[in-house]
Image: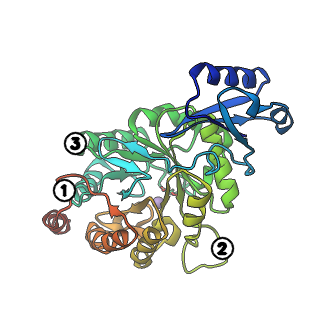
Amino acid sequence: MIVVMKPEHTDEELRQLVARVEKMGLRTHLSRGERRTIVGIIGERELIQEIPFTSFPGVEAAHPILQPYKLVSREFKDENTRISIGAHVELGGRAIPIIAGPCAVEGREVLDEIADALHALGIPMLRGGAFKPRTSPYSFQGLGELALKFMSDVRSRTGMPVVTEVMDARDLLLVYKYADVLQIGTRNMQNFKLLTEVGQVDKPVILKRGMSATIKEFLMSAEYIVSHGNEKVILCERGIRTFETETRNTLDLSAVPLLKKLTHLPVIVDPSHALGRTDLIPAMACAAVAAGADGLMLEVHVRPHEALSDGSQSLTPQAMAALLDRLEPVAQAVGRTILRTPQQGTGDAAKTAAGAS
Ligand code: PEP
Ligand code: MN
C-alpha cells in the first residue's frame, strides 16, 4: 500500500500513522520526494486492509501497489532514482556514465595501463573482477584482496570510483572496504542471503539480471536489497539465455524501456557479456543508449588476446575511443549526453590514449 501525505501534513501526523502501522507488525518505508511524502506499507495484505488510512489526519490518499515488488516499483515512486558515486558520477540523471575495465584484475601493471587509457578518454568509472565466478574450477579465479588493493590504488591515483563483484556474503566486508560499488553477478541474482546482506550496507549495488531470470524475478531481487534498507540499486541487463549460439547470450534490449516503465531505479546495459564478441558491441551499445539506458558497462583490455578471461569480448582502448564518438550523437538524439570526467575526454586525450596502448 502507498499512503500519500497531504502537502501540509505535520511530523506528528506522520509519526502517528507510522506508529499505528508498525504496531500491527507491518513495516513502513518513508520516501520524502520534492513534492510529496509517501509512506510505503509492507506486510500481509489482510492486515493492511484493516487500516482505514484515509481517516488518518494528514493523509491525502491510499493506493494498493498491485505489483509483487513494491518499493522498487514506479507505482511507489514516480521520480527516477538518482545514485551518486564519487565526486563526478551520477546514475539515473541526464548524463550517461560508462563503467569500463577488464573482466578480471590480472596484475597491478596491466590494470594501471587499462585504467590510465580509460581515464585519458574521460571514462568516469572502472570495473574489474577480484573474485571471478568462472564456469570451470580450473579457470583463473581472480586475485582476491590483492586485486581489490590494486583497484583502490587506481581510485586514489585517478579519482575513478571502482566497481567489483562480491560473490559470497563472507567476502562482503572485504569488498566493501575497497570498492565504491558492489556488483552482484548474474549467477547470484537469486542468492537471497547475499541480496539481504548487500541490502544492509550503504554502498550502491549493481544487480545483474540472472541469465534465465524474468523481469519480475529481476525486480523481486532488487526488492530484496531495497527492502533491507539499501535503496541504491542499479539494474543491469547483461543478456539472457536463448537457443541462439552465435552470441554468448541474447541482449534483451526491450528490458530497458520495460524496466524504466516498471521501476524508478536506474537501468544500465552490459553488451560485453551479452554478446561475447567485440564486433557487435558498438552497435548494441548505441542501441542500448537509444533505448534509454542510464549507463553502460563494457569490458576493455589493452591486449585482449592476453586477457585471462573474456578476451574475446574485450574492446581495446582504441575501440573504446571510437565507440565514444559513435555514442555521443546517439545520446544527444535522445536528449542525453555521455558523461565524461571533467577536464578529460577531449579529442587530444582520446588520441593520447589510443597512441599509448
Ligand atoms: C562481470 O561483469 O564480471 C560478470 C561476471 O558478469 P555476469 O555476472 O553478467 O556474467
Ligand atoms: Mn567478464
**Residue 218: image location, x then y, percent:** 64, 54
Task: Using the numbered discs, state the Cα–Cα distance from disc 1 to disc 3 in whole angstroms.
Answer: 15 Å
Left or right of 225, for residue 323: left
Q: Mark 2 = which residue?
A: 242
**Residue 318: image location, x then y, percent:** 25, 70
Against 62, residue 116 (above or below) is: below
Q: Mark 3 = which residue?
A: 157
Task: Using the numbered discs, state the Cα–Cα distance from disc 2 to disc 1 in whole angstroms.
Answer: 40 Å
Task: Using the numbered discs, state the Cα–Cα distance from disc 2 to disc 3 in whole angstroms.
Answer: 42 Å
Q: Is residue 19 visible?
A: yes
The yes-or-no answer for disc 1 within 8 Å of ligand 1 is no
Check disc 3 and give the amino acid type.
Answer: Arg
| Picture quadrant of residue 198 | top right
| Picture quadrant of residue 215 | bottom right
Which quadrant is the C terminus positioned in? Answer: bottom left
Front position among marks 1 and 3: 1
